[in-house]
Image: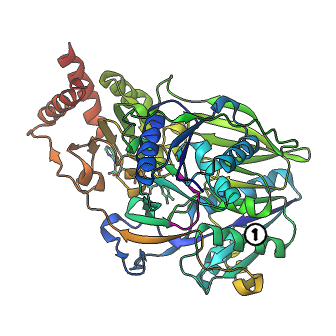
Amino acid sequence: MSNDVVIVVFSSDRAAEGLAGAGERLASAMGGRVFEIAIDPAEYQIEECLTALTETCRELNPRAILLSNDTYSQEIAPRLAHRLGGSAVGDGVAITAELRVTRQVYGGKAQAVIQLKRTPAVVWLRARSFAPASGGQAPSPVRTGGAPVLHAQTRIVERRRETQGEARLEDARVIVSGGRGIGGPEGFSGELQPLARLLGAQMAASRAACDAGWVPLTWQVGQTGKKVAPDLYLAIGITGASQHMAGISEAKQIAAINIDRDAPIFKHCRFGIVEDYRKVVPLLRQKLSAIQR
Amino acid sequence: MNILVCMKQILDPEVPARDFRVDALHKEAERGSANLVTNIFCENALETALQFRERAGDVKITVLSFGAPSAEDSLRKALAMKADAAALVINEGNPHPDPLTVAQVLAAAAKRLGSFDLILVGRESGDWGAGQTGGLLAEELGWPCLSFVDSIESAGGKVRVKRQTESGFEIVEAEPPVVLTITNDEHNVPRIPKVRDVMMAHRQPLTTFNTADLGVDVSSRYYEVAQLSIPQKESHCEFVPGDTLDQKVDALARRLLEVTAAL
Ligand SMILES: Cc1cc2nc3c(=O)[nH]c(=O)nc-3n(C[C@H](O)[C@H](O)[C@H](O)COP(=O)(O)OP(=O)(O)OC[C@H]3O[C@@H](n4cnc5c(N)ncnc54)[C@H](O)[C@@H]3O)c2cc1C
């Protein structure tokens, strides 16, 4: 086994930059090189991709394989580890040369350090939590040998996008997010979205609002939704359950509108207002337009 | 068609952060006064299977748990939701089985219980949230795996599933046997069992094994927890000043513009 690090990249955005940065620092701590395997998500088929990655990684024989925490990476990582005789762990926010990985557990209420016991370490990282590479040494690109699976039992037959234009929520600088307290889809479309437009913000939601079917599931932020890192996250009608906070721990500033002064969200806020959002938001929109004019 | 749904019993994840403590020595959460509940994604998985049975007809659903003897409660609840059969593998050896151990135990138990076309697991658990059981179980069995599925339809000899991605969703066709990891959406919110069914579930048979019966080594060889702690990161919230709503909202507007204008 070499001390090399392989990064597997499914997209070319801020997450990929963080991944390259994490790879560079880990490789330098272990005294190895960085290889990059780029995979086009539009071409992704599960069993083919897994087989090809397994073969390429067997040849490279790295000590660590890093992925981002997108859907495809999370799906591939444990299976890749199993095939390579290694160990996987996910949603890491730190990784050391001794293959100790820090991650949130218990819905964000606690933090654990996990010691991996087998190599290669296959780790999917909360890549946006990592600084980009210094650029000292670019990773060597590796082509995955096309390894068609002759009789694949699964086939992705249709892909649908349900996003807000081209911008990714993960890359948004300002986010307006609504929860169960919004009370229905009308509150989102009639109040929160116009507010978001005034602030140049993207929309997000708590799981409660997504589960209720008020907004698309792709808006969900949290432990099992998106992990976002905006400069400003405005939470409206959201309690601030630990599982929700797990998705915004990288936000620079959190602000909230909530009728309950004791809502846990305020413990994480820089500023906030204790009021019914139905009263606050219409007035806020008027004032924002007036000041901006 | 035979479906196996794996269910994990966990400490109630809705316990608020202020009541949550960890035992740093044993590296686990303190039980405190919290309830034990079934992991929500496992219940979403069972609900997805039940709805599939309602549409497809000839389907048998077996539920399986690996855990403490108390996990029987999760299985009885699943029976009350109208699963057809239940089995428990009692974990007496290792309070912290790693994901590979769990997958090996579930694979061995699945083989004992019969031959399945679909095995459903939750996408991750509300306690440790490793999110690896489905993928590792598929590898142990040599089956394919589809992740983040929220609904299943039968399509000839195949199944057609919808699964969530970060940008939308995908439709995937699969030839059983296949492992599916299930996530939540508005349609698979678990049903509440009827009182009568809860009573009846207590009289239904429960198959039990222990890990020795299954011949699985439960010592952790994959990974172990080296440290567990509660991070302290509270911030001081400034409530916007003002005597009237108008004054407060005015202050809020200025504060928001200050932050966004600096970008
Ligand atoms: C395994 C697991 C994973 C999970 N993953 C996620 C996740 O990824 N993301 C997530 O968000 N949750 C997740 N959850 C759920 C989480 O525990 C909470 O249940 C959820 O976040 C609550 O959503 P909420 O704050 O919108 O709703 P509620 O808790 O119902 O809060 C509503 C809030 O709105 C306020 N409110 C009500 N009316 C008004 C009004 N008129 N004006 C202003 N405020 C008002 C109330 O004071 C309250 O604070 C997960 C849970 C589990 C168990």
Residue farthest along the top direction in this orientation: A293
Residue at position x 23%, y 22% in the image: A288
Label 1 environment density (alpha carbons within 10 Å; few <14, some 14–19, many ≥20) = many
In the image, residue A177 lies at what x, y percent? 38, 38
**Where, quadrant-wise, is the C terminus of chain B in this rendering?**
top left
Any part of residue B148 in sight: no
Please give the residue where the numbered disc 1 appears in the rendered image: B107
In the image, residue B240 lies at what x, y percent? 14, 40
The range drawn in magenta is A116-123
> Looking at the image, which is closer to me, A192 or B166?
B166
The amino acid on which the numbered mark 1 sits, given as a three-letter code, is: Ala
Residue A175 image-quadrant placement: top left
> Looking at the image, which is closer to me, A36 or A274?
A36
Q: Is residue A203 magenta?
A: no
Against A199, is B203 above or below? Answer: below
Any part of residue A292 in sight: yes
Q: Secondary structure at mark 1?
A: helix
User: What's the image's color scheme?
Assistant: rainbow
In the image, residue B63 lies at what x, y percent? 73, 70
Residue at position x 21%, y 43% in the image: A272
Left or right, residue A212 beside residue B176: left
**Where, quadrant-wise, is the N terminus of chain B in this rendering?**
bottom right
